[in-house]
Image: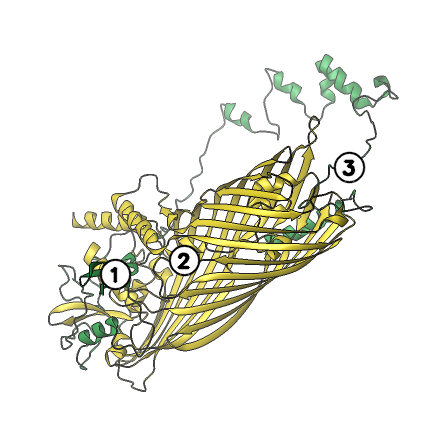
Chain colours: A yellow, B green
Amino acid sequence: MKKYLLFLTLFISTAIVAQVPEDALRYSFYPQNGTARNMAIGSAMGSLGGDLNATFVNPAGLGFYKTGEIVFTPGLMMNNNKVNFRESANENKKNAFAFGTSGIVWGFGTRYKKNVSNAISLAVNQTANFNNQVRYKGLNNYSSFSEQFAEEFAKANTRYGYSIDDVLNSNSPLPYGSAPALYTYLIDTISVNGVYQVKGAPEYILDAKQALRQEMNRTTKGGITEIAIGFAHNNDDKWFFGATLGIPIVNYSSNTNFVESDTSNNTSNHFKQFEYNDDFTTRGVGLNAKLGVIYRPKEYIRLGLAVHTPTFMGLTDTRTTSLSTQLENPIGSFNTTSKTFTSGQPGKSSYTQTTPFKAILSASYVFREISNVKKQRAFITADVEYVGYRGSRFNSDNEAPTENEKAYYKQLNEVVKEEYKGNFNFRVGGELKFNIIMARLGFAYYTNPYKNAPEKINKMLLSGGLGYRNKGIFIDLTYVHNMTKDIDLPYRLEDRANTYASVKQQRGNVVATVGFKF
Amino acid sequence: MNAKILLIAISAAAFSSCSTAYKSGQTPDDVYYSPVRPVEERTETKTRYREDVRPDQASSDYYRMRMTIRDRRWRDFDDYDYSYNNSPYYYCTSYHNNYGYYYNPYYYFQPVYYPKVTPAPINTTPRMVNLNSYRNYNNAVVNNPKMGNSSNNISTRQYNNSNNGNSRVGNVLRQALTPSNNYNYNNNNSNSNNNNTRTYTPPATNSSNSSSTPSSSGSSSGGTPVARPGRG
């Protein structure tokens, strides 16, 4: 009977599919990507229209098209991160290819009314690019990376009654952290006055008031590529209505390498070093819709409103970890991988995630909306965007979720609501046109999505670019400089204050768009 | 990477296959003004019927098709001799299908058994974190200016980002919990007086809690126990 109950408990716990609150931001806190022309003006496209990127911002902007064009936007991204971790400065760089909005748009008039037209677009865009590397190291005399495993195992023992033998199993309920840590003796139980406690070997260094050397290296790759089909209707060149159906494809991979070592020359203090590797990929597909309207009350002025529905995504994580531990007194070296505890194959978990909704309010002023290209002069445009970051939700994709699952998801979603908040983002930009040459500048500011952060967190983008348009083709070249202030927590503990690294990311983005009118 | 190459290839093909109506004259800029598309003159072609070719002068295929419709004997000219299928005496041995074997009274059906392979269970444990670690708040007492001398409790998140902050709450907590220097990292250590709150309750059937000797009360999660390597 006891075994059946234990089996039931284990089944319930392993059937839970849930992830971590940081995932909520990963799929929502990123700047608007687009064509080179649009990125040069701060990616403001809520009311301007006449650009393929309207498909992803305000599809009503497609209604300005009465011609057609094919667009291709490759790019290069250069990351330069300056990280301060516990008073130690670090710097690292990473470059990667990227691409902006590419695709085709086709505008066509109607036979019966002169100023009524429709447009349809098929576009693809890398809405988020995760290629980055964050690497830092420093001394820590306060907490150890291993404590998260000790905490996880102790909590599981209290809540579910997991013993060491339950965790050290070929189909373990805690296969990625606690099981490798127990197997390699990075954490173990000790008896204190007859009470057993879970303790990490590096804690002996901290207890002796000495510091640990910690080195963190996280490399992330992939992105969100969204395929979208947009449709817009132009009514008398005054009202423009549009809708987009988007299919985002998520492809994210993360490799985290964490090394912690003893800084003393003492060879009898029980701990020398451990190295932990965490590899996981997230893949999946989602669905969203974007609805928009642009009102042109009089010549030169455009007012826009767009609403992006939450994206519903079905995701699958594949994960493998490895741990190598070197201990002292007695000397021992142990290593293992999580596959030992996941039936010899990488673990897989599936779940659904809903990203927050967005609303964009925008205005543009276009000088000289006339057909003669030589007399077209300039435009300025600005967007105000609201994103409800606290609205991200995780759910099981099981058909009949258990009560434990519901309780976990309820807590996870509550943490997301507590951790994040809705905020406003701002984008503004303009263009000067000199017949066939154009010059552009833009600015964007994305405000802090955290409700209670230890430091000020934001994204600021400065952009500029040039454009050429003649003989049926157009070429745009843009540079965007993205300055992001963020924090990175290498681990979290319930009963200790959390340590973190301050990250100042400088990302240069060179984008080129080549287009062809037809 | 393959997707990027495919995208580039499709784009290159699209560019190379296009011709533009704006090679001469002005190239419209749809942001400012989008003119109605210039309409190219179409060449009237009739593809449905060709008046210069009478049906009776067309290919033999045309005749065969017509005659096949009228007279089933013409179907014998087809590659597929499906006319035989209509024969009650037809015994299907055609390579097109093997259904006929099952109607043969002398046919002995011999089932083939494949050994059943049970795949190893996929571990579906998610990337979970201790969600309470997002809630490690420190209740601070602050003066409330609206209430005069009274005070309110507010919650602030605990962070420790300095090695010098011994006066901070976390370090005070750790120092209070610091045990004596007499450490022994094994299960039999009873000398430490660490007040660590991460307690462990061994299973009732395994009171010794020997970490190097897994007990028999192992998991029933469908897996097998994994023995820890011995420790010197």
Marks 2/1: CA–CA distance: 35 Å
- Residue A319 is labelled as 2
Between B123 and B176, the one lying in front of the other is B176
Classify 10 Å Cα crowding around label 2: few (below 14), some (14-19), many (20 and above).
many
Helix, strand or loop under label 1: strand
| Whole-percent x, y for residue A167 in the image | 26, 60
| Quadrant location of the C terminus of chain A in the rendered image | top right
Q: Amino acid at mark 2?
A: Arg
* Label located before the other in sequence (1 or 3): 3
Between B216 and B84, the one lying in front of the other is B216
Classify 10 Å Cα crowding around label 3: few (below 14), some (14-19), many (20 and above).
few
Residue B225 occupies quadrant? bottom left
Circle 3 residue: B38
Residue A83 seen in this snapshot: yes
Residue lying farthest to the left in this orientation: A194
Helix, strand or loop under label 3: loop
Q: Is residue A133 left or right of residue A125?
A: left
Q: Is residue B107 above or below residue A56?
A: above
Q: Of circles 2 and 1, which is in front?
A: 1
Circle 1 residue: B155
Q: Amino acid at mark 1?
A: Ser
Classify 10 Å Cα crowding around label 1: few (below 14), some (14-19), many (20 and above).
few
Q: Amino acid at mark 3?
A: Pro
Residue lying farthest to the bottom in this orientation: A265
Q: Chain of mark 3?
A: B
Marks 2/3: CA–CA distance: 56 Å
| Whole-percent x, y for residue A25 in the image | 42, 55
